[in-house]
Image (cartoon, grey):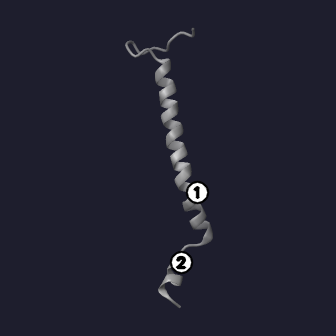
């Protein structure tokens, strides 16, 4: 058996699937947190800090 085949058999399909799904999910989570912080920042008055009134 070649070393390439042995190296591939170390990780199961489930492990590879989870690793492949983790990258986009992590990126999505970071993006969602950044957008949430932007929304919260626009609702606050930059000078005094309290929440702005609705227009």
Residue 15, placed above or below residue 9: above
- Tell me: 11 left or right of 48: right
Q: Residues within 10 Å of mark 1 (few under 14, many from 20)?
A: few
Provide residue 44's location: percent of width, then percent of height.
46, 17
Give the class, few, some or many, for how many residues have Cα within 10 Å of label 2's Cα (few <14, many ≥20).
few
Vertical order, 35 against 20 (above or below): above
Residue 16, percent from left and from top: 57, 66
Residue on which the image places disc 2 = 8
Q: Residue, x 49% and y 82% (percent of image)? A: 4
Q: Quadrant of the C terminus?
A: top right
Q: For residue 40, which numbered disc appears in the image?
A: none
Q: Quadrant of residue 20?
A: bottom right
Q: Dot 2 lies on which element?
A: helix
Percent coordinates x, y for residue 36 in the rendering: 52, 31
Residue at figure coordinates x 53%, y 77% from the top left: 8
Disc 1 + disc 2, Cβ < 8 Å:
no
Residue drawn at (40%, 16%) of the image: 46
Q: Which residue is mark 1?
A: 21
Of the two numbered discs 1 and 2 on the same chain, state the one appearing first in sequence: 2
Q: Position of residue 28 (x, y in %)?
A: 55, 44
- Tally the numbered discs: 2
- Distance between the alpha carbons at the discs numbered 1 and 2: 18 Å
Residue 45, relative to residue 27: is it above or below? above
- Residue at the image point whose x is 51% and y is 47% from the top: 27
Tag 1 secondary structure:
helix
Q: In the displayed image of the protein, which residue is found farthest to the bottom?
A: 1
């Amino acid at each position: 058996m070649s070393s390439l085949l042995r190296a591939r058999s170390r990780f199961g399909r489930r492990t590879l699937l989870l690793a492949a799904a983790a990258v986009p999910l992590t990126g999505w989570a970071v993006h969602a947190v950044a957008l949430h912080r932007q929304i919260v920042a626009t609702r606050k008055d930059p000078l005094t800090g309290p929440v702005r009134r609705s227009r």
